[in-house]
Amino acid sequence: MAIVRKTDTDAPARTANLLVSLGLAESGTEVAANWLSRSFTHVAALWPLMLLAKLCVAALLGMLSFTRPEHGALLCGVVLIDGLLMLVPRWALFRNLRPHVQNWLMLPALFCSGLIFSLWLAQGNGVAMPSAVPEMAIALLAVCIVGDRRLLGLSYFMGALLVAGIAHAGMVHLGLLASCLAVMAIATLRQAAADRERAIEQHRQDLKAQRSDRLLEEYEQSGRGWFWETDRHGHITYISATLAEPLGVEAGSLIGRSLTDIIQQGDRQQGDGERTLGFHLSARTGFADIAVRAAIAREERWWSISGEPVFNEYGQFHGFRGSGTDLTEMRRSQAEVTRLAQYDSLTGLANRVQMLQALEQAVLGSRGKQGECALMMLDLDRFKSVNDTLGHPAGDALLRQVSQRLQRVVGNQGLVGRQGGDEFKVLVHGRHDRNRLGLLAQAIISALSQPYSIEGTGVVIGVSIGISFCPEDGVTADALIRNADLALYKAKGDGRGVYRFYSADMHADAEDRRQLEQDLRHALTADGLHLVYQPIVSSTTERITGYEALLRWDHPVRGAISPALFVPIAEDSGLIAPIGEWVMRTACRDAAQWDAGIRVAVNVSAMQFANPGFPTTVMQALASAQLAPERLELEITESVFLNDNDGTDAMFTRLKGLGVRLALDDFGTGYSSLGYLKKAPFDKIKIDQSFVRGAAIRGSRNSAIIKAIVSLAEALGMDTTAEGAETRDELDLIRQLGCSHIQGYIYGRPMPAAQVLEGQRANGVSARSEGFQSSRPERKAMLRTVAVHHDGHVYNGRIRNISATGAMIEGLWNVPEGTQFAIDLSEGQSVDATTRWSREDRMGVEFAAPIDLALLRPQARALAG
């Protein structure tokens, strides 16, 4: 066992602690500064009783006669000393002294008080009652007054003992005083340490309480929480001022009100609000984190309240005490998170999640009955070019305007949502016929196709719509979405800007389209594509001035596939850029082998034109083929002006800077106005074949349109090329109207590059027209039995082919020209006709008015017996 040795510093430390305990030395920071001062204040407050007791004793002993002068002097001394003990501890000067200094001043004052009173009693010779009894009584009263400051009582006794010793008092008197002094000395020393420890502990408790008060006050002022307390009846007895401030009331006005009065009633099923809180208060059970809503707040405020019942040591209920925190911002954040989870942040429409939930609820129906609804899938046409040319901020602005228009058109007819990107959905509840949904879809197409203004730039886009119905086209949300998507692909494949209803055969079409896209990718990498060239001829000299490069695809299984089918697939799949680059290189390389004066025309898609790197592609193709820039003619459609902006003008400037020629293709069939012709540097306008074909037919307005275009081009100093000329009548008309160039089957069909070279070697640049004299409407081959009425007789005939204006009928022999008939083409469909030629049992008839072949009903087939 280790031996603890006492050091030299132990005795001084114990002495110092003893002096501190007795209040004779500096106490440091272990106890409060007023530990001793409070005792002196109490002594001063009670010392008048001491003076009164002394005067009463003196009166009983007959010492107030003042027969001797020294008695009066001693009495004045008693009053003076005791008066100072009553007054000095109350003075601020005394209270500002250190506690141990105050103690040192009080000790001699008490000693003098005991000394003078004892001297006064000792002068009372001849008094019947011994002075020891009243002296002891007054001394004990002094001890009672000084209380736990026993050292002051000890000082008083020492003054009395000193007088008794000087006055040679009796042994009894001295013994009483000495014994009291000894007892008090022992008690003072024994209790000094305990009193000091108790004072230190009390000081610590006070500091802890003060610290807790400060922390609670800081916590309340920080706004992180607040506290409340109620009595046994549930009335508020305390509430933090920080809670009352947001409520717009004074904290004092809430005192005495029931806690449940400031809280709104909650939802019993959800277990929140005043109902649950009231239950806990009435049941006197603790609760934690109950969400409640304030009832007297000027704005919506939410709190989280916790509380515990308060009982005294006898188990009696006193009320509740608890805390609370403000949940308002958290609730608002949760509401915002919920809103963001249900709504699109850009457009404010329902997002993909909400639309899917609404669709699932719509198809489920109610009470076990299958739901009925319609789903529209919308995809914006030409939106990608807006993002590519104007940037994504402009695209976002466009989407917001689209969503606003869409909401205005749909209104309360359905739920509008954004699927993502440039795709939208419209969910229409209930059963609706196709005509009504078709009208709504057409209204959406019309509204969304109107021009937009984005950052001062005019933008025109379109929209395609696919529609599916529940339960006809599917009884699940996934099925409806898939089928509406298929209908949307059909709408985009049919030229865009239209709506289509889902049909079962669209699955096969979608698979066929997917397979074609895959095959097209393979054809691009495996040289499965090739170019053919159609001559462009001068209308005055009939000399070939150039060739238009046309893309062709011979599928290894399906054979030749029309560009009208695979070019849209290339645009949707992003293949148009590499295909366009390949066409540019190949066309320039082939043209470099032709005569020096012959140009090559290459079609440019809107996506190629919007690519900032397109001029570099053109320059590289020219440099690689060693082809002069003026021999390349870029044919650009009007669709590039849908996003007419500075980027479009800059692209035209860069292309013209290369020295190439620019031609406006398919003029009059696009979406733009004539305004762009004022600034676009075109060298040629190409008149679309839809204006050329049939222009020579009597009554056609196409010739007037062609003439107007030619006049406009001449005024602007541009050439013109009429596309699609097939007959000599059309050729003559085009020349008469002043077109500078002609392109069409009349001068040759598109041919491979090798055949172009062969023709140039054989015929040079001369062109020869070959074709029918006049054009006729498109004919449709068929075998249909018809009834022919003439002069009250009915004859049976068979139609071999038919067009909108006539037909060839067999079965009637040697019919004279000019004979008029009435022909029943189908049930309820009859037409008047006149014979124009007749050979044996065949004749050609002309209808009195054109018919619509699309309305020609199929003939019913007889069942085999």
Image: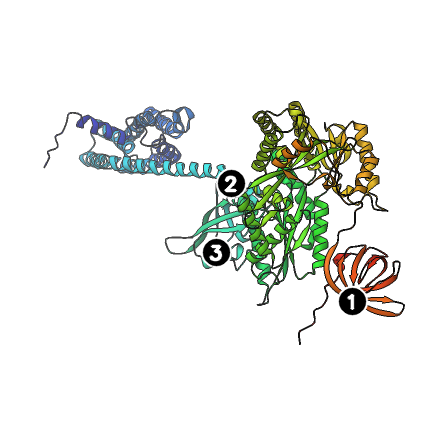
Q: Viewed as shown, does residue 529 lie left or right of 665? A: left
- Asked if residue 755 is positioned above or below residue 360 in the image, the reply reads above
Work out how far the residue at label 2 is from the one at label 1, CA to CA, in angstroms.
53 Å
Q: Which type of secondary structure does the marked residue at label 2 adopt?
A: loop
Percent of width and height locating residue 167: 22, 28
What residue would you read off at disc 1?
827
Percent of width and height locating residue 117: 31, 30
What residue would you read off at disc 3?
281
Among the two numbered marks 2 and 3 on one chain, the one whose residue lies closer to the N terminus:
3
Toward the viewer: 842 or 13? 842
Among the two numbered marks 2 and 1 on one chain, the one whose residue lies closer to the N terminus:
2
What residue would you read off at disc 2?
526
- Image quadrant holding the C terminus, namely bottom right
Work out how far the residue at label 1 is from the one at label 3, CA to CA, in angstroms.
87 Å
Label 1 Cα neighbours within 10 Å, binned few <14 / some 14-19 / many ≥20 = few
- Image quadrant holding the N terminus, namely top left
Mark 2 or 1: in front is 2
